[in-house]
Amino acid sequence: DGGITQSPKYLFRKEGQNVTLSCEQNLNHDAMYWYRQDPGQGLRLIYYSQIVNDFQKGDIAEGYSVSREKKESFPLTVTSAQKNPTAFYLCASSIPGVETQYFGPGTRLLVL
Amino acid sequence: DQQVKQNSPSLSVQEGRISILNCDYTNSMFDYFLWYKKYPAEGPTFLISISSIKDKNEDGRFTVFLNKSAKHLSLHIVPSQPGDSAVYFCAASGTTGNQFYFGTGTSLTVIP
């Protein structure tokens, strides 16, 4: 079955700790994205990658980092510099030039 | 600056009646628009889209209308069913890249 998986479903972060959210897709999509959703707000773009070994900052990249070493994988690290990390994080993928994005189930990050 | 706006945070409709969800955008460079449906703690799922060369696109019970001069689009669901109860996001993208901009969502409740 083709799709996007995100893990873990829930993640707890201690103050000053870096945590990494996993996103894997087997759709053979070139483009991948990370969004953040806060209550009452739309999805805001953190980072996106249109090809392996290349990625661009979105609107709210500060305090986050990504890597794209493989086509299938686009992990997001929430660093200690991100002062308000509590949110629902969504990963998506698409074929460049095809506008529809496919989303994973999301990871909810909570700060202890 | 929110480039895509959904001004109604919630909407309640009787089963069998029409649901109309509205979305406004500010960037005239947007040329592709999408609607996503989202259940709690899940990723959004693609519903329907429309390109700027059209003013209407229909898929079963779902129809999207685009008014380019007013920078407004709407999603009509007829007839509404209880399973349609979810949060609906509109999104827009332009030709300058693969970046998508999402509205804040409208929570639709269909009352049996």
Image: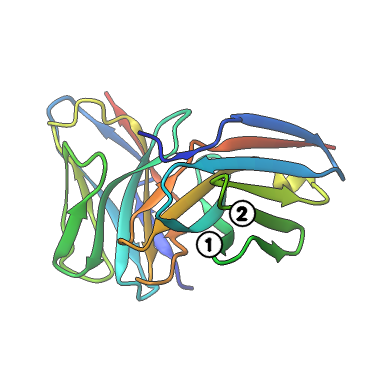
Percent across and percent down for residue B42 are 50, 47
Percent across and percent down for residue B103 are 48, 40
The residue indicated by pointer 2 is B66
Residue B74 in view: yes
The disc, 2 or 1, on the residue closer to the chain's N-terminal end is 1
Q: Chain of mark 1?
A: B
Q: Quadrant of residue A59?
A: top left
Marking on residue B52:
1
> Which residue is at 12% across, 31% downward?
A81
Quote the CA–CA distance across marks 2 and 1.
Answer: 8 Å
- Looking at the rendered structure, the secondary structure element under dot 2 is strand
Percent across and percent down for residue A84 are 25, 26
Q: Residues within 10 Å of mark 1 (few under 14, many from 20)?
A: some
| Tally of marks | 2
Q: Are marks 2 and 1 in contact (CB under 8 Å)?
A: yes
> Which residue is at 25% across, 47% downward?
A58
Q: Quadrant of the C terminus of chain B?
A: top right
- Looking at the rendered structure, the secondary structure element under dot 1 is loop
Q: Amino acid at mark 2?
A: Leu
- Horizontal relation, residue B104 to residue B81: left or right: left
Q: Residues within 10 Å of mark 2 (few under 14, many from 20)?
A: many
**Residue extending furthest toward the bottom:** A28
